[in-house]
Image (tube, rainbow, N blue to C red):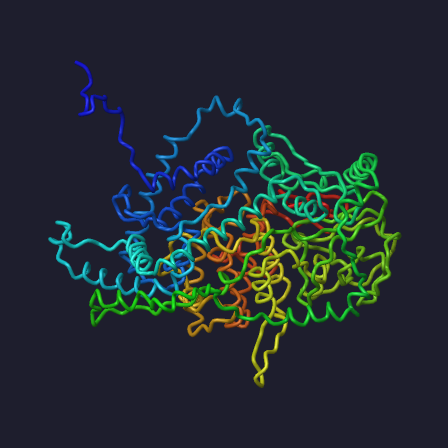
Amino acid sequence: MGRRKDKTGKSPKRGAPEHFTGFKQAFLVARADSYQQALDAKATGSFYDKVTLAFIKKYGQEEPFNKEFAEDPPDPEDNFDDDEDDGDGPHPSKEEADESAELFKKLRTKLSQWYRRKYKRPEVTKATASLADPFTGILTNKMKAPRKLSPFHQYFKSFYKTRIKEEYLRRYAIAKKEYDEATNRDKESGAAKKPIAVQLRTEVGMAFWLLESDEFRAEVAQEAEDAHAKAMEEWEELQQVPTTPVQFHQQLAFAGQYLHPVADAIATQMQAAVSICIIGPVGNGDVEVQSIHVNWPGGPAGATWPLHDPMGYTQAEESMCSYGRANFSAADCRRRKLAVQVPTQDESENDPDIEEVLQSAQSIPETGPVVTDHTNAANVGRPSDILLNQVPAPSSAATDNPSAPNALDALPPPAKAIAPARITHNGNGHTSPPTPPIPSHHPSLPDLQSPIQMLDEPAAHRSAATPPPQVVPAAESPEPRPWRRAPITPEPEELSNAATVGAIQEGPSTTSSAPAPPTSMQTSLMISAPAVPDTSAWPKHMVDAYHYFVNDTAVANDASVTQTRDWGHEWMECVHAFVEFQKQSGFPDTGPSFPPAAGVRPTEIGIWMKNRRPWKDVGIADTAGFVQKWRDWWSSLQPDSRTANDTPMIDMNWEKLKKPGRNGFLLIILSLVWWGKASSRDEEWQTAVAEVSKVLRCMLGGLTSVPDPPGHGSLNGSSAANPVATISSKRRREGGVTGGTSTKKRRVVD
């Protein structure tokens, strides 16, 4: 007997029907490239978490998951609502939070099954499948063409908080109250339907959109066209072969973004150590070497070429520079030289323009949202005036007032991200100054991207033109960078692994004696940190965050007074590790959030989000309660394999904490600031800072095991001795291996 045919005479397709169709299927298919990359990197678990969170933000997590919407909701990156993150939306009860966690798990399982069935390739094809141009393939996946928003989505993006949000919250409160008061019989029969936040939000937005005038909608459509055209122009510039000095400089700045995945993929696929070197003229017109180094997965994390054999790598680098000078003519070097003169330190100090920049950098204005002024909107009136009369508001329905858009969202993103400039070596024994950064008076930030700086000349030949702030023999200090004021301090006899991140590797000393090492934590920090952080390539939201973490602003006599947070070496090391974590992720302002933590996360964080995320301290009324909630929250974010007494290890699964952006690890550091101020930085706070710093270094691939610093036990109460002994600074100077999977010298691009 043959297969049954449908009305059209065609045999039905065998197998289970498509679970996701329409808008939801298109949403999942659009992320197929990311799934393939996660499959190659053996990181599908992280991908499933991210795609599930994005799916929930766009479509909600109400069952059935395959229910189709009449209108496609805005994508998560276009929806600046974040109700569940910033505290504006209704707070779930414990039962609702448990139900949400269970639905998240079910949806994640469903999505993982869908991707495996659709896209998982046979094992035999992994070794044979190759792209005609692997670099172009990675480039395409990393920097896709910007997507054009529909007029409705552009309207939703621009006016959600100012026009739509208040009415949406009101309607949601009404629908939620009606559902909660309905009988079980009505719920089971479907007469009472549970409100779906995403669907209701889209419906209210569409109602507002349809009430706007034709002229206004035409303006919004043109705004979407203009925004897409501008984004496409910037994207196309990055696809072209560079021809101007600025384009060459920008290509080098972006090189690390593309080459890191290439190096990691080669190391994993070939099980080999990988070094990628770029030889050519840079912004100063000299031939230099930019490099990335990755050890093979089975080797020690920090045993890359520059750290294993610093002298040998320096000689190889000089040979590469010599090779480059033979291949690039003087005309080629001049053609790529930026038309910017690097001022000397004395010129910078006496330059009134630079002084003006320094003074203006001290104050961080709170910027409001930038709202496009549509002239026709005033003639139409607010659509909410019409919609408010359509549904009666219940007397007991409490609704939150909509908050103004986040100040971070109002900041215009940089057209092109340019990585911080680095000191480079041109093979002649001289350092070449890069493009000058904007100076700053803030505490020092170690160049964590360059964990070990191996000087190319003996200490006896180093320049000592800049007078040191302390009376220390010149041979005991590394050569200061031309545009920074580097404090010169003697090195302590012993440094823990925690203190070696960003430390300077000194060459052979010519002095027979040195002053006694300093004992304070502040002076020991100066060994590993240049005096002035290079924030010129940072986006504004990262600069604002860093200023807040290291400075305390108070109001006295109607004037703002800014003072440095003198909180010790451990705190500065933690901040610097966080900056490096953000830097390696591309300094994102948005991104994935931590897993749901209803009732665990300190409530002060939600209050800060609701108040437009100002860079100000949040008062803590109950310090003990805050600390207990913080500890519970921190414990919930730890790897499943880590017990209460475990020392953080680099091989643990840190995916739950690897959340860059405004809703991720930033909240951890921010809450530590409030805790430190409320508790006067007591011992429990210092223990927390030490552990957060160790976890950050583990996530950065800095150490295979991070010992507890002296005087600090485990955050979870463990006081067991650390099984890993510290490495002395003498061994480190002799070329001993220290941590860092992405171990790079000052020439390394990111």
Residue found at the far top of this picture: 1
Q: Is residue 361 above or below residue 715?
A: below
- Image coords of residue 266 (percent x, y): 60, 32
* 340, 700: nearer the viewer: 340
Is residue 730 in view from this perspective?
no
28 sits left or right of 192 in the view: right
* 358, 556: nearer the viewer: 358
Q: Residue at x 20, y 68 (%)?
A: 392
- Image coords of residue 136 (percent x, y): 58, 34
Q: Residue at x 75, y 58 (%)?
A: 491
Is residue 471 in view from this perspective?
yes
128 sits left or right of 106 in the view: right
744 sits left or right of 403 in the view: right
Q: Quadrant of residue 641?
A: top left
- Image coords of residue 584 (percent x, y): 59, 49
* 235, 127: nearer the viewer: 235
- Image coords of residue 649 (percent x, y): 54, 46
* 648, 356: nearer the viewer: 356
68 sits left or right of 132 in the view: left
Quadrant that contains the N terminus: top left
Q: Is residue 105 above or below residue 420?
A: above
